[in-house]
Amino acid sequence: MNIVLLGAPGAGKGTQAKKLVENHSYLHLSTGDLLRAAVRNQTPLGLKAKAFMDAGDLVPDDLIINMVKERIQEDDAKNGVIFDGFPRTATQAVALDSELAELGQPLDFAILVDVNKEVIIGRLTSRRTCRECGYIGSDADASCPKCSGEMYQRDDDNEATVRNRLDVYERSTAPLIDYYRGKELLVTIDGDRPVDDVYADLVKALGL
């Protein structure tokens, strides 16, 4: 089964993807991780991508798509793939559909983990990170519960930055949601609930 996970930063997509991987052996394909691995391993596509990244430019769609195409042909993708962070635009979605069709592995679902914007702002602005071990907690943590290190707020978790990230997400992803709705692949799940409740609905929607 191939699944695209959609949702704003802080909606909890990564948490749900992790639970699906643990329970159903899917490949969790994050394009960020894919890019970093390709650059680290100095693959031909990775070297091309690195040139754009070093210049501070976005990596072009065709490079990302080719990396994804290579990755989903590996053995550990045979059980199915959870696409997280890709596609980001309708153009990428069309390209992904084309590649999956060539492989005879069409997309089964596009799952939107939907959380109110103000709830996400509250989640992200209250997030704190340990300077010592990287533990992620909240502003309720006076010190790190794992190592007693200092907890701080990352620059990208301040309210102005979070609002900008969400505005960018909404502008780029709204057409993507419409695209998958038009293909009758979109399933919307209320993400503003406990993790296990969201996961139960996700599993039900996927028929697992």
Image (spheres, grey):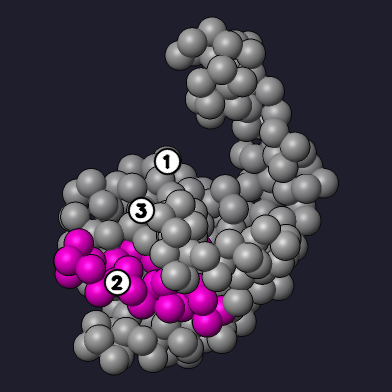
Relative to 116, does residue 144 appear above or below in the rendering? above
**Image location (x, y in percent) of residue 103:** 25, 86
Going by the numbered disc 1, the residue's amino acid type is: Pro
Which stretch is magenta? 61-85
**In which quadrant of the rendered image does the N terminus lie?**
bottom left
Characterize the local packing of mark 2: few (<14), some (14-19) or many (20 or more) Cα atoms within 10 angstroms: some
Going by the numbered disc 3, the residue's amino acid type is: Ala
Numbered label tally: 3
The residues bearing labels 2 and 3 have C-alpha atoms spaced at a distance of: 16 Å
Q: Is residue 206 toward the left or the right of residue 172 in the image?
A: left
The residue indicated by pointer 1 is 194
**Image location (x, y in percent) of residue 42:** 44, 59
Relative to 93, does residue 77 appear above or below in the rendering? above
Q: Nearer the viewer, residue 53 or 126?
A: 53
Going by the numbered disc 2, the residue's amino acid type is: Ile
Q: Nearer the viewer, mark 2 or mark 3?
A: 2
Give the image quarter of residue 206. Answer: bottom left
* Contact, mark 2 vs mark 1 (Cβ under 8 Å): no
Residue in the image at 22% along x and 88% along y: 104
The residue indicated by pointer 3 is 17
* Contact, mark 2 vs mark 3 (Cβ under 8 Å): no
**Image location (x, y in percent) of residue 156:** 72, 42
Q: Nearer the viewer, residue 196 or 149?
A: 149
The residue indicated by pointer 2 is 72
Characterize the local packing of mark 3: few (<14), some (14-19) or many (20 or more) Cα atoms within 10 angstroms: many
